[in-house]
Image (spheres, helix red, strand yellow):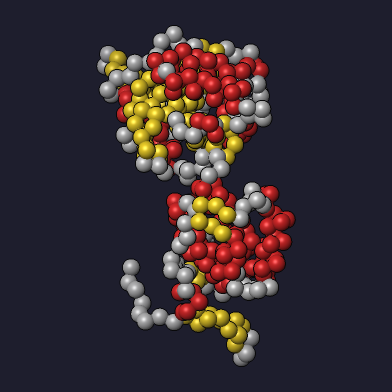
């Protein structure tokens, strides 16, 4: 879990890259940029806001041979080893980014390489390297008094409320390729940023395993439990799955199957589904792993516990403890109306 509030910018380098395939140029600043007290909080918020608002999906540098051949990994490591060389390394990073700007769709823009101190990652104070790029320019108006009139001047600039591209590389887990967060608001060239430039893949830790396995369970519920039973059982399955993850520190698949899958006919279906779909969710080899409470909390917020009926009635089951839906909701068939019904038990209506 990250906390960026106390982060301090120790070095900022600003350069510009064009599209190499269109013979656009590159501009390298000779010296680091000297921030003013007025600009520092604005530029820090511009760089970091998107990461605070985004789900924490970590990446790591990868290389098919060895990380020592990963150019960006080497440049970033040099900054961590010698922060006084941050600006010189920023020049290399910018030239490397320029060399990856080969597709016609890639936009030019300003490149910011930042050395941060005092970031909190998993309650540990770490330094980090931020690499950001602003691509889209927005129109804005400036006003100037000119004799007896107010003159309107149309200019273009960077919109500080939205970061186009960015990566935060934390000085942690170096041997595995560091822990990295990435932002890319422009989806048309994702391969350029994540693959060609950063050269990353998902960081496989307890957060990754927990999220992937719960996503796999969610799709098993939708693809198998729902057709075999009904919407209520789909929701109940996911509720049991969530509560199992929330009440255990370590995941054991055999224990999970025994506690969560109540219908014995679905046990072989679950194993078959994992065998067929496991690669898609990257869970085919997962049977035991530590559980991330943060990932469980994030996943619970996204799981839909709603039954939509064709009579324009919606039943929302908002529960954290596991047995509410089973204890207080019953499904039946009305012979006279030839319709299904849900019977809901309660003591009183809550006023919210």
- In the rendered view, does 41 fall on the left or right side of 160? left
Instruction: Name the residue furthest bottom.
Output: 336
Residue 150 lies in quadrant: top left
- In the rendered view, does 9 fall on the left or right side of 97? left
Residue found 45% across the figure and 62% down from its top: 247
Quarter of the rendering occupied by the C terminus:
bottom left
Taking depth in this image into account, of 293 and 144 the one nearest to the observer is: 293
Residue 68 lies in quadrant: top right
Residue found 51% across the figure and 40% down from its top: 58
Q: Position of residue 297 (x, y in %)?
A: 45, 55
Q: Position of residue 70 (x, y in %)?
A: 60, 24
> In this picture, is 218 found above or below 322?
above
Number of numbered discs present? Answer: 0
Q: Position of residue 344 (x, y in %)?
A: 47, 80
> In this picture, is 220 found above or below 50?
below
Residue found 43% across the figure and 69% down from its top: 321
């Amino acid at each position: 879990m990250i906390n960026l509030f106390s982060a301090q910018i120790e070095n900022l380098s600003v350069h510009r890259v064009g599209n190499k395939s269109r013979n656009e140029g590159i501009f390298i600043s000779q010296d680091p940029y000297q921030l003013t007290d007025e600009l520092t909080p604005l530029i820090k918020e511009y760089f970091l806001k998107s990461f605070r608002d985004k789900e924490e999906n970590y990446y790591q540098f990868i290389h098919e041979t060895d990380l020592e051949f990963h150019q960006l990994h080497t440049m970033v490591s040099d900054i961590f080893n010698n922060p006084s060389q941050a600006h010189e390394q920023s020049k290399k990073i910018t030239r490397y980014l320029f060399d990856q700007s080969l597709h016609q769709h890639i936009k030019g823009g300003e490149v910011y390489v930042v050395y941060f101190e005092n970031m909190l990652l998993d309650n540990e104070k770490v330094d980090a390297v931020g690499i950001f790029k602003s691509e889209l320019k927005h129109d804005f108006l400036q006003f100037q008094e000119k004799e007896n009139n107010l003159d309107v001047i149309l200019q273009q600039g960077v919109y500080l409320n939205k970061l186009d591209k960015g990566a935060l590389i934390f000085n942690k887990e170096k041997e595995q390729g560091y822990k990295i967060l990435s932002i890319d608001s422009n989806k048309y060239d994702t391969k350029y940023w994540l693959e060609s430039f950063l050269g990353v893949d998902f960081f496989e830790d307890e957060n990754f395993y927990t999220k992937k396995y719960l996503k796999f369970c969610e799709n098993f519920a939708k693809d198998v439990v729902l057709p075999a039973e009904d919407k209520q059982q789909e929701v109940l399955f996911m509720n049991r799955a969530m509560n199992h993850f929330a009440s255990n520190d370590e995941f054991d698949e055999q224990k999970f199957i025994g506690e969560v899958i109540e219908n014995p006919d679905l046990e072989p279906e679950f194993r078959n589904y994992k065998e067929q779909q496991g690669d898609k969710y990257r869970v085919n080899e997962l049977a035991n792993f530590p559980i991330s409470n943060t990932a469980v909390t994030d996943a619970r917020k996204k799981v839909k516990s709603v039954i939509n009926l064709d009579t324009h009635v919606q039943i929302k089951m908002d529960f954290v403890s596991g047995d509410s839906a089973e204890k207080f909701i019953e499904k039946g068939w009305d012979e006279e109306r030839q319709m299904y019904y849900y019977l809901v038990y309660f003591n009183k209506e809550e006023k919210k």
